Amino acid sequence: MPVGFGIIGCGMIARFHARAIGDIRTARLVACFDNVPQAAARLANETGCRAYSDLKKMLADPQVDVVTICTPSGAHMEPAVAAARAGKHVIVEKPLEVTLRRCDRIIDACKKADVVLATIFPSRFHESSQRMKRAIEQGRFGRLTLGDAYVKWYRTQQYYDSGAWRGTWKLDGGGALMNQAIHSVDLLDWFMGPVKEVTAQTATLAHRRIEVEDVALATLRFQSGALGVIEATTAAWPGALKRIEIHGSEGSAVMEEEDIKTWTFARKAAGDAALLKRLTSKTTTGGGAADPAAIGHHGHTALFRDVLEAIQKGRAPLIDGPQGRRSVEIILAIYQSAATGRAVQLPLQRDPVLPPKPRANRRRK
Ligand SMILES: NC(=O)c1ccc[n+]([C@@H]2O[C@H](COP(=O)([O-])OP(=O)(O)OC[C@H]3O[C@@H](n4cnc5c(N)ncnc54)[C@H](O)[C@@H]3O)[C@@H](O)[C@H]2O)c1
C-alpha cells in the first residue's frame, strides 16, 4: 500500500511536489487543499487527486499519511500544526516559518504528536553537496578558514506583484535572504556551522512596492573560528547560478548550483579528478537564478524518499525541524544586525522586532 500524500497550498511549488511524489513508487498523491477552492480543483484536475475545500476534512482523510505544506512562508504554521494534531507526518517548504516562535510551535506540535517533521532544502540532496559535506567531515580542507555563499539572482517587479504575500514581512518574512538565498544559508551552515556571529547590511534598491530587502550582505564568524560572507540579491540582472566557496589550510572547493567547479586538495585522493569531471556540468536548469520555476524536482524527490525512510525506520529525517529552524535564525540575526548596525551573536534569545524601519513609501497599500 503506497504512502498517501496530501498537498496544502496549490500554487507554483505544489506542482514540483506532485511531480516528486509521482516519481516514487511507494508514494501516491491522494489529496490537496487550498484556501482558494479553484486552485485546489486545478491541481486535482492535473494530478487526479481529491480536492478539498475544508482543511479539517482533508486531515480527516485516512488515506492521507503525510502532508506537504506549500502555503506562503508566513502561513506554514497553522496548517502544519493542524496536520500534526491530526496525526499526519509533516513536510514544510522553506523557510520552516518566518519567526523562531512560529518555527518552535511547529516543532513542538510535531514532537507532541510523535510525527516526523522535515523542512525542504532540496540542494542538500544534490551529489555535489553530499560530496562537499563528506570532504569537510573527513578533514580534507585542513583547518577551515573561509566559507562564502553568493546568490546573485534576478526577480522582476512582476514576480513581486504576482502574489500579495510576496515581498511582505508578514508572509514572505524577508526578501532576497529569507525567500531566495535561504537554500545557500542552509548549505553554508551545514558545511561550516554553526554560525556564531553576524554583521550585516541590507537595502531595497531595484524593486518597488516591497517591504523587504532585495540586496543583503553579511559577514559571518563560525563557531570554529572560520570567517565567511553571504551576498544575496534579487536585483542582479540577468541572474547567475548560486555559488558556495569553501576554503581551508589544505584545500579549496567551489560549487555552482549542482556543479563542482573547483575541487583541489593538498593531499590528493583517488577519484578526485573523476569526481570533478563528472560533477563539473551537472546543472540542467537555470537553478532559479532568473526564473523561480526553472528548477528541477529531483531534490524534492530525494528529500521525500528520505522522509519515507525516516517514517519506516523511526529515525529523524536529514533536515528535521530544528535543522530547518537554523537558517531562519541566521537570517533573522542578519536582519537584526542590519537594523541596529551592531554585530549579533547566535543563538538568538528571541525573535528580533521586524521590520526594523517600516518604509511607508514602499509598503503595499
Ligand atoms: N524549495 C523551493 O525551491 C521553493 C521554490 C518556490 C517556493 N518555495 C516555497 O513554497 C511556498 C509557496 O511558494 P509558491 O511560489 O508556490 O507560492 P504561490 O503563491 O504560487 O502558492 C501558494 C498557494 O497557497 C495558497 N494559500 C495561501 N494561504 C493559504 C492557506 N492559509 N491555506 C491553504 N492555502 C493557502 C494560495 O492560494 C496559493 O495557491 C513558500 O513558502 C516558498 O518559500 C520553495
Image: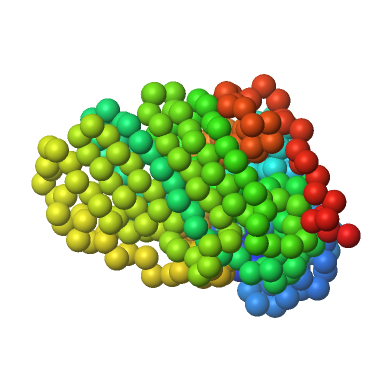
- Coloring scheme of the render? rainbow
Q: Position of residue 27 (x, y in %)?
A: 54, 60
**Rendering quarter of residue 267:** top left
- Decide if residue 99 is on the left or right side of residue 138: right
Residue 213's x, y, as percent? 66, 50
Give percent across and percent down for residue 52.
79, 64
Number of dots carrying numbers: 0
- Between 160 and 8, the residue placed more toward the observer is 160
Does 47 sit above or below residue 349? below
Point 74% across, 62% down: residue = 208
The quarter of the picture showing ligand 1: bottom right
Q: Quadrant of the N terminus?
A: bottom right
Residue pictured at 53% horizontal, 39% vertical = 218
Q: Please state the horizontal and vertical placement of residue 212, each as a whole percent of the image.
A: 71, 51
Q: Quick check: 326 left or right of 188? A: right
Say whether residue 235 is visible: yes
Residue situated in front as seen by the camera: 348 or 297: 348
**What is the quadrant of the C terminus in the image?**
bottom right
Tell me the residue at 50%/65% (across/down): 239
- The residue sitting at the right extreme is 365
**Residue 117 in view:** no
Please give the name of the residue rendered at 19% of the width and 46% of the height, measured from the top-left corner: 264
